[in-house]
Amino acid sequence: MKVLVVGSGGREHAIIWKLLQNKKIEKIYCAPGNAGIGQLAELVPIGAMEIDKLVDFAKSNSIDLTVIGMDDPLVAGVVDAFEAAGLRVFGPRKNAAIIEGSKAYSKELMKKYNIPTAGYETFDNYDAALEYVKKGDFPVVLKADGLALGKGVLICNDLAEAEAGLKTIMVDKKFGDSGNKVVIEEFLTGPEVSILSFCDGKTVVPMVSAQDHKRAYDNDQGLNTGGMGTFSPSRVYTDEIAKVCMETIFKPTVDGLNKEGRTFKGIIFFGLMLTQKGPKVIEYNARFGDPETQVVLPRLKTDLLDIFEACVDGTLDKLNIEWYDNAAACVILASGGYPESYTKGYEINGLDEAAKAENIYVFHAGTALKDGKFVTNGGRVLGVTGWGDTLDKAIETAYNGVKLVDFKDAHYRKDIGIKKY
Ligand code: AMP
Ligand code: GLY
């Protein structure tokens, strides 16, 4: 069997690493991938948004299944294009990926089907939005409607900040057309948990819980990033809360999407906040999380290819998905300066050593090969994952892994998994 994975981050590295545990896969390709992925898969020099080229490649190379890792091509309709060409593909169609592509749509869906989320209003006019924040409470949350590389959410503590924020999104168009509309939301508090789930259009199967650390520096200081580290399981996401989420959030989301004619097959990532008034949805993503995937997939016992096939075929209810009773932690090694400007091209040392270490795997996010050596090639460079019987052991193992690898100006958080909640 031949598989193509589309994307280039640590998430896609983890997906490919897990898929290769299936012996039916004789060849795996990744477009465009990164240098670390290149050790496991054949890299295809086609960008994730070059949809026609991806379709042509899948056809001419008789790819049996294509797995889309990234959000942009999903929102742009890559799955529809593959299906139109008669190709098998894992991921939601454009009309379902809209739960990530438009925050205004996702809020409408939640309102219509009584799915708990923060109170909100949507505006496409700057003056009306400004009038609204003038009347409201602070802090207030502003969200650009469309995709914004995880940077389109602004938490504003007073009117001056809110006015500046609305200007940034709607007038200066910092996030381009994503800022044509803005969602203005009530500010919620509580621990945040990431629940990724497999979905075949009818059945939704949540994966083990994870928590992300979004801020750049220790103790949640500094700017928001794509994610500086994760751990699984969450200490606060109890079985009881999981049951509540299934009944009030997961099933109603999948059923609601069906009723809207937007059947969802693929991964729904529920970004949840556990508030005093119960779990609420902060955001939906239509794909695996990054770096959540790097801690969730190492804990998966069931074959990942079998699960993807069941999602495509609509037979998830027939599969018993099992997990190891262990824990995992992932520490991101970022380029100094990330998420703002940083230098690329520094040599990465210690990868061979780390590859020999037990219960550790180094997933590559932004790496390239230069003269046969691995060099930094992005903001997030590596995700060092460790696993063990307990969360404490997993965290210790991940940090032992971090000690093995290095590059100039490498930056990482020292407090991954040490959250009080
Ligand atoms: P998002 O891109 O929607 O995940 O938002 C980025 C981050 O902003 C989230 O991880 C939260 O920490 C924060 N956030 C988003 N919405 C709210 C909200 N309504 N109340 C408080 N914090 C929020
Ligand atoms: N780690 C958060 C995300 O993948 O959106």
Image (tube, rainbow, N blue to C red):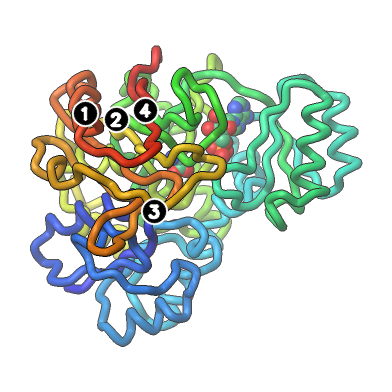
**Mark 4 — residue?**
242
Q: Residue 91's x, y, as percent?
A: 40, 61
Residue type pointed to by label 4: Ala
Callout 4 secondary element: helix
Q: Residue 307's x, y, as percent?
A: 24, 55
| Left or right: 52 in relation to 352 | right
Out of 407 and 156, give the one closest to the viewer: 407
Q: Can residue 315 be seen in this view?
A: no
Q: In which quarter of the image is residue 47?
A: bottom left
Residue type pointed to by label 3: Gly
**Mark 3 — residue?**
345
The quadrant of the picture showing ligand 1 is: top right
CA distance separating discs 2 and 3: 32 Å
Residue type pointed to by label 2: Ser
**Mark 1 — residue?**
327
- Whether tag 1 and tag 4 are in contact, CB under 8 A, the answer is no
- Whether tag 2 and tag 1 are in contact, CB under 8 A, the answer is yes
CA distance separating discs 1 and 4: 18 Å
